[in-house]
Image (cartoon, rainbow, N blue to C red):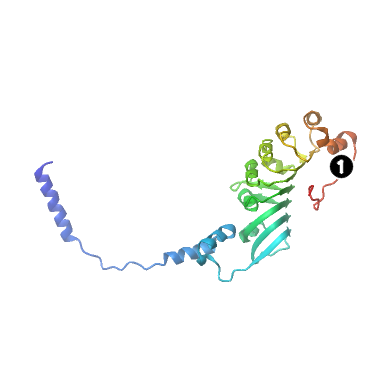
Amino acid sequence: MNENLIEDEKLAAKLLGQNLVLSTAAFPLTDFKGNLIRYLMKNVNGRLLFKLMNLNKWFIPKNLKFECFNDMLFAKNKYTFSTYLWITGKLDIYKLQDIPLFFQKLLYCNLKNVRLNNVILKFNDFKQLIIGGNVESLYFYESAILNDFNEKAALIDDIIDLTPKLKYFLLVGPHIFDSFTGGIAKKLIQTNVECIRMYIIPESFDIQTFVEIIREKSVRFIDYSFDQTVSDEYVAKVKEICPYEHIRTWYGERIENRPYPCLHHNDRGGQ
């Protein structure tokens, strides 16, 4: 490198250093930790708040109030959600309209039985109900699981991975079948499932794949029925695919005009 250029750079650096003046302006004092905690306390609810409370005592609200429930039914708008909720055992959500508020107040849940009756849930909200791995019974009655960012049905076959102890699996459609494929049978045969009841199955559901896979597992009780709108061709296909003992009641009503028993809200689903 040119020696003259080096000397010029040294001189420029020296002059720059001589002209630097230490600022006397005071830095603003901020309570970053306190501000962050206050922000989170104001904007975080439910399970995430519970995680933060476990991390640091500062996240515990001053007047924390929660109610403990076991085998709880939340029906329509009969509950005000004035406190946080701690739920174990069984949870039955029946025609509850204020779903977002319910999950804001849901501090903790460890459930064995989840029953959804005439409700629409977002995928992440539904996942909160079954996290823990202790769910033995899943019951969907005229309910729907939607994507978190749109109103389309969420495909949730893989959700069964979170329920290894599952014994009872009940679907009453037709809308809930939009969230499952016939491939869900691959997940079910890896659980403890003893009872499968699937009612009002639409023609769009891949029953052939489901039945072929589920045969690999010895399931104590299986019962299928199909939507009234399915075609005669589909009925013939079902009769060919499904073991007769699994469709006997439905087939008797469809072909032999025998009355089909009603499935009531308090039906225990083989339990």
Q: Position of residue 199 (x, y in %)?
A: 78, 42
* Image vertical order of residue 236 relative to residue 226, above or below: above
Q: Nearer the viewer, residue 125 or 78?
A: 125
Q: Type of residue at label 1?
A: Tyr
* Image vertical order of residue 43 relative to residue 206, above or below: below
Q: Position of residue 129 (x, y in %)?
A: 65, 53
* Image vertical order of residue 43 relative to residue 210, above or below: below
- Residue with the most extreme bottom position: 63
Count of number-bearing discs: 1
Q: Position of residue 253 (x, y in %)?
A: 87, 38
**Residue displayed at 71% across by 41% down:** 177
The residue that mark 1 highlights is: 260
- Mark 1, secondary structure of its residue: loop
Within 10 Å of the Cα at label 1, are there few (<14), some (14-19), or many (20+) other Cα atoms?
A: few
Q: Position of residue 267 (x, y in %)?
A: 81, 50
Left or right of 260 in this view: 38: left
**Residue displayed at 65% across by 59% down:** 102
